[in-house]
Image: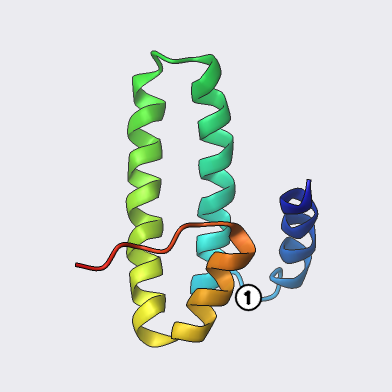
Amino acid sequence: MVKNSFISVSSQEKEKNRGSVEFQVFNFTNKIQRLTSHLELHKKDYSSQRGLRKILGKRQRLLAYLSKKNRLGYKELISQLGIREKKTR
């Protein structure tokens, strides 16, 4: 339940800056959580699966950009949202 309280607090804080990379990653994470719970019930909903993969790719690209530009902000955002860090080659 800690994540849900963070989501409500973060959405209030970031109302002002909707275009920031952090807010977009936060918003994509919420969408991913909703689609994942939807797909647990509807396993054969292939269009939702495709949408989920597209959102995951967008979030991955935004996180890659953020890790290049602001490494500390990237680490903080990942820890707050509970996302795993990307694998480095």
Q: Quadrant of residue 63?
A: bottom left
Relative side of 17 to 22, left or right:
right
Instruction: Report x, y in % for residue 45.
Output: 40, 17
Q: Nearer the viewer, residue 84 or 47?
A: 84
* Image colouring: rainbow
Q: Is residue 63 left or right of residue 75?
A: left
Seen in the picture, residue 8 relative to 20 is either above or below; the reply is above
Q: Picture quarter containing residue 54?
A: top left
Quadrant, the C terminus: bottom left
The location of residue 14, given as percent across then percent down, is 69, 71
Q: Is residue 51 above or below residue 19?
A: above
Q: Where's residue 48, x and y in %?
A: 41, 28
The residue sitting at 51% across, 32% down in the picture is 36
Q: Nearer the viewer, residue 73 or 50?
A: 73
Q: Secondary structure at mark 1?
A: loop
> What's the residue at 51%, 53% (across, down)?
28
Q: Which residue is mark 1?
A: 17
Residue 20 seen anywhere in this rendered image of the structure: no
- Mark 1 is surrounded, within 10 Å at the Cα level, by few (under 14), some (14 to 19) or many (20 or more) other residues, namely few
